[in-house]
Image: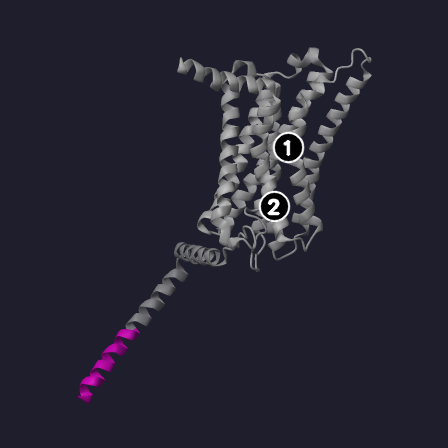
Amino acid sequence: MSDKLDFTRRKFARKKDNIERNLDKSTIMVCKHPELQSRLRFTMFTTFAFNTTVSKQPTFSFIGIPGLEAANIWISIPFCLLYFVALVGNTLLLILVRAERNLHEPQFYFLAMLALTDLGLSLSTMPSVLAIFWFDVRHIGLDACLAQMFFIHTLSSVESGVLVAMAFDRLVAICAPLNYTRILTHCTVGCLTGAALIRGATLLAPLPFFLRTFPFCGANILSHSYCYYPDMLNLACGDITFSSAYGLAFVLGTFAVDVVFILASYMKILGTIMKMGTQDRNWRPLHTCACHLSTVIIFYLPLISLAVLHRYTQDTSPILYTTMSNAYLLMTPLLNPLVYSLKSRQIQAALHKRFWVQRVIAGE
C-alpha cells in the first residue's frame, strides 16, 4: 500500500515539474518576442482598465420629494398630467406653425423653436422623475447622469438664446417696422437659432469631461429629481475650483448677457414709444410683447432662484430645492403654450380654424 502511495506522489511531482518547465518556456518565449510582449501588455492593460472602470463607476441617488415617499403614487398623478399638458401643448404649437400659412413669420418661427426646446427639456427630465414616483427607482449611473445633465443645460441655454432672438424680433418690429421684412429674413432666423444651438452645445461640452475627472467618494445623493451640474459638482471629491469657476463664467456669459440684452431691447422699445407725440403715441405695440415678457419671467425667475440657492445657501430645506427645481424645468414647458394660446390672437385664430371650424364642417 505504501509503495502505491509513493508511486502516485512521484507521478504527480513529475507532472508538476513538467508544468513549471512549460510555464518557464512560455515566459522565456514572451520575453524573446516583442510582438508577444506587446500583446501581453495590451491584454493586461485592458483587463485592468475594465475592472477598474466597473468597480469604480459611481452611482447617484435621487431624493424625490423628502418626507413624502409613501405618497409617491399619488404625487405622480399631477406630475403625469403636467407632463402630458406640456407635451401636447408644445406639439400643438409646432403643428400649427407648420400647417398655417399666416403663421409663417419670424415671430412664430422663433415660437416653434421655443416649443421644440421645451419638448426636449420635458423629455430629458421625464424619465428620471416618473421613475422615482412610479417604480421607486432612485439610482442612476455616471454616464446616464452626465448625458441627462448635458441635455438639460444645453437646452436651457438654447431656450435663453431663443428668447433673445424673440426680443430682437420685437425690437425690429416696433422700432424699425419698415425694415422688418428686410432684416428678419429666413436666413436671419436660421442664423439666430443656429447660433443659440451652437453656443449652448459648444460651451457645455466640457462640463461632462470635467466631472469625469473627479472621484465621487460620498453617498452621492442628488438634491433634485434629475442631474444638475452644481449639484453633481458639490458631490465631487477634489479641487473643484476651476470647474466651479467655469460654470460661473458660463452662467455670466450666457444667461446674464441674455438678460441684459432683453432688458436693453425693451428699454429701446419703451424709449421709441415715449419719443412719439402725445397724439401719435400708441401703447398697443407693447401688448404684442406681453407673451414674450411672460415667457421671460416664467423662464428666468426659477432659473435665477435655483442658481442662488445652490451658490449662496447651504442649509436650505430639501423641500425648497425640490420645489424650485421642478418649477425650473416643468413650469416653463407647461406655461409657454398656455400663455401664447391665451395672449396671441394669431394662435387663437389658428386654433379656432384648425379645430372648431373643422369640427363644425365634419358635423355638417
In percent of width and height, residue 209 lies at 57, 46
Gap between marks 2 and 1 measured at Cα: 21 Å
Relative to 95, say whether 206 is above or below. below
Q: Disc 2 or 1, which lies upstream in sequence?
A: 1
Quarter of the figure with residue 189: top right
Relative to 147, say whether 137 is above or below. below
In percent of width and height, residue 116 lies at 53, 29
User: Camera-side residue: 163 or 33?
Assistant: 163
In percent of width and height, residue 175 lies at 73, 17
User: Camera-side residue: 209 or 327?
Assistant: 327
Q: Residue 157, can we see it? A: yes
Q: Residue at x 56, y 41 (%)?
A: 150
In percent of width and height, residue 267 lies at 77, 25
Per the image, is 11 magenta?
yes
Disc 2 target residue: 323
Relative to 139, say whether 5 is above or below. below
Disc 1 target residue: 160
If the image is split into quadrants, where does the N terminus sit? bottom left
Q: Which residues are magenta?
A: 1-17
Secondary structure at badge 2 equals: helix
Kind of residue sitting beneath label 1: Ser
